[in-house]
Image: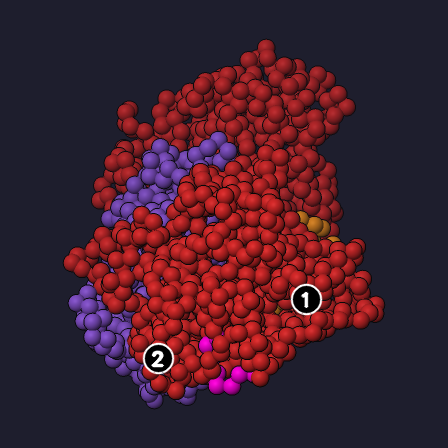
Chain colours: A red, B purple, C orange
Amino acid sequence: MSAGSHRVRSGGRIDRREPRAFSLDGRRLTGYRGDTLASALLAAGVAVVGRSFKYHRPRGFVTAGVDDPNGLFTLGTGGRAEPNAQGTVVQLTDGLRAASQNAWPSVRFDVGAINSWFAPVLQAGFYYKTFMGPTRRAWMFYERFIRRAAGLGAARHDPDPDRYETRHLFTDVLVIGAGPAGLSAALVAGRAGARVLLIEQDGLLGGTLLSDPVDGQTESWRVRLEAELESLPDVRILRHTTALGLYDGNTVILLTRRDHCAPDPVQGEALQIVTTVRAKTVIQSTGAIERPLVFPDNDRPGVMTASAVRTYLNRYAVACGRNAVVLTNNDSAYAAAFDLAPRIDRVTVIDVRRAIHPALATQAASLGVEVHAATAVTGVLGRTRVRGVTLTPIDGARGRSAACDLLCMSGGWSPLVHLSSHGGIKPRYQADSAAFVPGGYAPGHFGAGALTGRFSLGEAVATGWQAGVRAAADCGFERAAGEAPTLPEGAPWDTANHRIEPVWTLGGARAAKAAFVDFQNDVTVRDLEIAHQEGYESVEHLKRFTTLGMGTDQGKTSNINALAIMAGLRGIELAEAGTTTFRPPFVPARLGALAGRHVGRHFRPVRRSPLHAWHLGHGAEMIEAGPWLRPWYYRWAGQTVELAYLEEMRRVREAVGLSDVSTLGKIDVQGPDAAEFLDRLYVNGFARLPVGKARYGVMLNDAGTIFDDGTTTRLAETRYFMTTTTAGAAEVMSWLEFLAQTAWPELRVHVSSVTDEWAGIAVAGPKARAVLERALPGCDVSNDALPHMGCLEIEWDRVPVRLIRLSFSGELAYELYVPADYGTAFWEHLLSSGEPCGMRPYGLEALASLRIEKGHIAGAELDPRLTLNDLGLGRMARPEKPFIGRELAARPLLNVPERPSLVGIECLEPGPRLRGGAILFAASDEMKGHGRGYVTSVTWSPTLGKFIALGLYAGGLQHLGEEIVCAFPLYGERVRARITSPVFLDPKGERLHA
Amino acid sequence: MLRYSLSRLVRHALTDRPWSRAWREAKPRNRYDVVIIGGGGHGLATAYYLAANHGIRRVAVLERSYLGAGNVGRNTTLVRSNYMMNGSTQFFEFSLKLWEGLSQELNFNVMLSQRGQIVLAHSPAQMDGLARRGNTMLLNGIEAELLDRGQVQHLLPYLDYSPAARFPIAGGLLQRRAGTVRHDAVAWGYARAADALGVDIIEGCEVTAIMHDSSGAHGVETSRGRILADRVAISVAGHSSQVAAMAGLELPIESHLLQAFVTEPIKPFVDHVISFGAELFYISQSDKGGLVFGGHIDGFNSFTQRGQFPKVEGVAQCALALIPGMSRLKLLRHWAGIQDMTPDGAPFICRTPVRNLYFNGGWCYQGFKATPAAGWCLADTIARDEEHPLVRCYGLGRFAQGGASLDEYGHGHWTYRH
Amino acid sequence: MLRIECPLCGERPYTEYRYGGDADKRRPMHGAGGIEAWHDHLFLFDNPKGPHREFWQHVQGCRQWLLVVRDTATNIVAEVALARDARGMDRQGPGER
């Protein structure tokens, strides 16, 4: 096992006693605990880790964090395969299998690189200008190839075996980012006694301090703060946790990754956790990321940001090269140069500025670092890795080449303004730091550290401290927090605050074609020039036209450079150009984590009737009915629904059946004005309904169209028991509450949903009374004592029973309501009582077919596009009685006679069948357009021996007896049928009243 | 207009010859025949068809922000014509027909990808609903295929057919001519073509007042001065109420947020446009490789252009309920647009009570797919001062009259339920 | 995420509530008002970009309908009251029955 050719012998935060074996494209490699995939690969000397999106240019790591645009891999296999994993943030685990992407046959030799020959043609916007011929569908041909070439990693369709969780946390102070500013803020707020939640996307606290030498001045300070934070009881620290976004109401969404612990989903351990945090105050200490510089061939493997090189050296003990050139326009890059100098062969600083801070010059000299001021890198030698650079003095003299195997660049720093922008606050350009900073903070939000455009360690601690004090005070914690922890002496580059001189491109005109601004999406300076020429120059047009910043990194390293270059082309200030909109999530987040446990059968909650278990145990095949699961049919009647429902129907029509109607909405309406309330609500009257009687009612909405229906029973002078449709239950309940509370608060009425309190059982069939006589001995259920629409409140074995004589099927039928907990016992009691009569349960399919035979409206007809008249129910409304919807139901075009209205339809052909969704035409019509109506519900009627249907037909029953055509062109069918009354069975209601 | 072609592209590439602007940076003139408020897809299309179909070229398109800043650049790019209600069926089919020749007409590749859309059903009742829709389409000359569960599985083997699926798939309705269009290209293509015909496209020009009196509208006051016009059209969906109020109009419109989502780019994963049937959810894959999807509006009036997180969770759950394999894919970005919602889910293209003032808005979820037809019909309505036959159903007065419903899904009169 | 302070239950996420639309439009008296009054009430909206009076029901809590003033440009909630109380002054009055 090799520790890696680029691994430095000592130092770093890796644990050399714990090797981690992993592979890249099948090549076996070893790293250490504490490595990222990126650091382990760099240690092993792997320079080319991917190919770019468009030109397939070889690419290596550019940064050491979430901003890296290049190092994307597919990790794992099978259902655990994850495309586009960022090597710089993947914690190295034993057995990790990584594969490179977007290259064939390999990243080192990639056929796709042929694209780079056509690079001039594949410029920004090329596809808008071509692929339009020879035919109108030509794009469909080209698109196939373009789709295959596009995309980065390949995803698999296998289900994900892992488990994800979501949770909620509440805190006084949320501190986002545990760099020096965040640590200080959390400490002071914690000392003040506030509940503090400190989150850090890294596995370690410290932020940029982690890139300092592990034996350096800042480490003891970092350790001391961490220890004190851990000791504070109300401070909670979440590591490996990223703030994905800021939402309304100080809500911050966190993603905690536990990938490195290999959690076991079978044991219920989550791989990732999404946390919704409601914070009283939020401290944004998200830091800043270093910008690359833009110069020809700046994308070659081995060209990296200076801070990344320093991180790899100090944190991971990886020297990314032996002969380094550091290119900078500010002081911060000197840190990398000075840390590298003692560890590698040679370090040269190329500084585009004319004046070098004397302290830096002195230190450079003492470390043997050569510094060239007023010089730029204007070219890079080498293709699959850096072999040298072209150095050109700023004043235009001729360049010379210099050998090197590593180029560290620093174009300044971009604060991570994402979170403040998510809240709708536009970033503001701060010229002295050449950076966009938050344009402000929402109430209760505070910024600290590099986010504010102040990059020194001292300022980070000071602003963090201040933010912590203010946040805690905002939450009412003003306890004195003691002294700010004393800082180690700052290094010279630190106190000097960077002294940046912005420079947005190097290398002049030659720069254009191969000077990359967006590495991942292959956007060059030339592309920006084309966008400018064509007028796509506002920041959003630039992005959309060139695809700049639209990669998986969302332009973290590229956006500001591009905006600055475009501002230069337009001759305007960068401040004026502004930025594109920062959108959540801050880093790409797995959909699995966002979905949490609401997957598979838990996607949405299931509602079950109190009799659910009985149904499952007695051969019911269940079906989804909105959120409910209901018995579709029972296997006693047949093995398929087609067979079973006919048998169940026959049982109801010839003997007796029972079915579970517990899903109906049930509402208890009480109060002195209950009668008036219902009178207003239903189109028909309820005030004069006698106690002990039930009535069918229809409700309209305010627009005067159909809302819901059901029966309501008057239990007492001031008390009604309302049922609604299953689907409409929640809507009706809210509507009643709305009316009672807002429209008619003067009515003394109270409504309560009792849907879950009562189990409902329908007993239907000619022998229904016989069953009840046996089941409820001592209760007179004779026609006189309990006529149709009558109600009795009785007791069965001391259990209250509401017995209402109602029929949906058209048979002699009863609905019985008992408290839900007694539902199963009562159901079984009814079944055993009904056994001699041959009573069996029937399901939803039979229920629906029975009602079609009887012409009762249900789901498909209870349509808010229809009116009372459309359903033939106009007579229910009494014109003198006001009811909800009365006024708008009178709108003129809702009342024209040619509107489609409810009819029965019977099939006239023996072979073919009627189908729901068929379009209706008169026999003489041409079969085109929207027809005269459509079929809403259809069934084979075993009673009538033919297909029958309900439907809407223009003019409705004016056409009674006429022959029509049911067109179903999807199946090439036209079936002859006849308009009939929608009541196919027992129109006089003799069965009902039997 | 510089004609785009492969040979032109090669010539420019080889010679480094600069490209010309896609559209001029026009300065507002004092007076136009027609001023269109709103430089989105619809406004630009209207300007183009005014010039191309009616020879009306003294036209200005006024855009408050950058061209295409609104919903034309924020939608999920779907085009289809599987509409069932009389009026919408014909209108959206006309739109799809216009899409089919648009790249060639504009000489700008809008990348119409007719990959087919499948709407899923999860119950026998939903299958009946799809049947009615599909039958209506066929009877109106629009192709449609009703698929059973097996046929859906054959086409889309990666959906959840397991016993664990909460809402098992019963079947689906396929429209093969439906698909996607590169949304930004639509705005740019219309802008470029309209500009070539003489239309002035004026960005960064906010309308602050509509000049009108009892004789009608006469022009607009803007952040860049007064502009007189014989006719004024409003095409600013999302902010329709605000602009119409400048002419004293109150509309049957509320503004709501619709979020949209895109994953990281991956190799081809979903070849069709798929719509879930258990909840509102639709997904397709862009040519760049990202899975683009969306759901229902957030559900309460808002102009914030940023969504609520519970909706993000809900949409992710729909995605996995449909395609469990998406679990490991990463959400890259989510954003929101403001859309006009109406009491029947259908739009308005019409004259208004103010003479010479025309209105286009209320698009709910369907503004993008309507772009060519909306532009065509609004241009016609302006030019003739009478509603184009295809949009006579889309008048502002329809709620007072009652009449045949345009409510495609029967959600009722609440704007926020559609 | 949007949070609304229910006068009875305290501050809760909006997902516990059901949105009930514009509360600014005076509902015509029951049984009164013609097509026009009801049309304007039901179908026309101020739809302001700014403070908006709207109904929400705390369906997963006390089930009370609330009158909320929320700025549609910022989603900041300025006022919440029980609709039963808040409607008091612009209600049609006791003579309605």
- Residue designated by label 1: A218
Question: Crowding near pointer 2: few (<14 within 10 Å), some, many (20+)?
Answer: some
Q: Quadrant of residue A315?
A: bottom right
Secondary structure state at the residue bearing disc 1: helix
Q: Nearer the viewer, residue B110 or A405?
A: A405
Where does the N terminus of chain B fall, quadrant-wise?
A: bottom left
User: In percent of the image, x 49 and y 51: which residue is there?
Assistant: A4
Q: Visible in this render: residue B115?
A: yes
Is residue C88 found inside the magenta-colored segment of the image? no
Name, please, the residue furthest toward the top: A836
Give the mark nearer the N terminus: 1 vs 2.
1
Q: Is residue A353 magenta?
A: yes
Chain assignment, label 1: A
x and y percentages locating residue A585 in the rendered image? 53, 59
- For disc 1, the neighbor class at 10 Å (few under 14, some 14 to 19, many from 20) is many
The mark found on residue B259 in the picture is: none
Nearer-the-camera pick, A817 or B320: B320
**Residue at the (47%, 82%) spot, across then down:** A373
Q: What residue type is disc 2 on? A: Gly
Q: Which residues are magenta?
A: A349-357
Q: Where does the image place residue A320, in percent across and percent down from the top left?
A: 48, 61
